[in-house]
Amino acid sequence: MPVATFDSTVWPESIVQVLDENHLVVISDHADARRRFALTLTQQLDLMEQTQVISIDGRKCVDLPSFCRELETKLTIPSAARNSWWCDLHSVIAVLRSSSPGRRRRYLVWNDADTMLNADAVMFRRLVNALFAVAAETEYVSLDPVVLQRVVMLGGLKMGEYAEDDRSQFNRWLLEETDGTNDDPKESAFWEVQNVIERPPVLVYRLDA
């Protein structure tokens, strides 16, 4: 996976340009550095017209319901799904697909994302796969007007190890959305986009490099 060194002399403009083509994983051993990065990036993205920025406090996200509680005040949830959309990943995928912000760009900035990775690695990889795949669908599969969706995830040592794992969802699609054990791409909820895009477009930045 490509790894870049943080360069404060050209940031944040260069980071915003990176997000035109990639999702971003930001690794640092220092929580304060990650939060400063997330805050500055969010402020920069907020200046862009027709852009929705969704900030996720990962310290509160240990499972799917707690992650969805962070999302539900910022996404348009269909009325029929409001009481149960967070109960399973398939419902979350449906909401992500249907809740168009009516803007040209949507950025999800998920700080302390390794909190869920530590608490429930299986759900973490399934959720990451869903976020990346829905983003790819809006660009390459959907017939609706293109909405650029990008995910910025920030974490520490554990997420750095995950990023280096060739089997992680930063490096490959999860072929079988339920448990990752089936090698038939058509068993995936995202088989169509996986036939179009070889792997998730993810770039890793190490702030401490």
Image (cartoon, grey):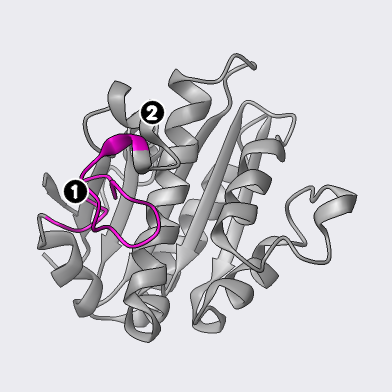
Horizontally, residue 206 falls left or right of residue 53, namely: left
Q: Mark 1 and mark 2 in contact (Cβ < 8 Å)?
A: no
At label 2, counting other C-alpha atoms closer than 10 Å, the crowd grade (few under 14, some 14-19, many 20 or more) is many
Which structural element holds mark 1? loop
Q: Residue at x 79, y 47 (%)?
A: 76
The quadrant in which residue 74 appears is bottom right
Q: Residue at x 48, y 29 (%)?
A: 137
Q: For residue 193, which numbered disc appears in the image?
A: 2
The residue to which callout 1 is attached is: 171
**Mark 1 residue type:** Asn
Whether residue 116 is in magenta: the answer is: no
Horizontally, residue 172 falls left or right of residue 135, namely: left
Does residue 96 appear anywhere in the picture? yes
Seen in the picture, residue 60 relative to 175 is either above or below; the reply is below
Whether residue 180 is in magenta: the answer is: yes
The quadrant in which residue 199 appears is top left
Which of the marked residues, 2 or 1, is nearer the chain's N terminus?
1
**Mark 2 residue type:** Val
Q: Residue at x 30, y 56 (%)?
A: 25
Seen in the picture, residue 160 relative to 135 is either above or below; the reply is below
Quadrant where the image shows the C terminus: bottom left
The stretch of residues the image draws in magenta is: 167-186
Q: Residue at x 45, y 59 (%)?
A: 127
Question: Marks 2 and 1, how far apart in space?
Answer: 15 Å
From the viewer's side, name the closer residue of 63 and 34: 63
Horizontally, residue 168 falls left or right of residue 127, namely: left
Q: Residue 120: percent from the left, percent from the top?
A: 38, 80
Does residue 201 appear anywhere in the picture? no
From the viewer's side, name the closer residue of 164 and 65: 65
Give the main secondary structure, helix, strand or loop, of the magenta stretch. Answer: loop
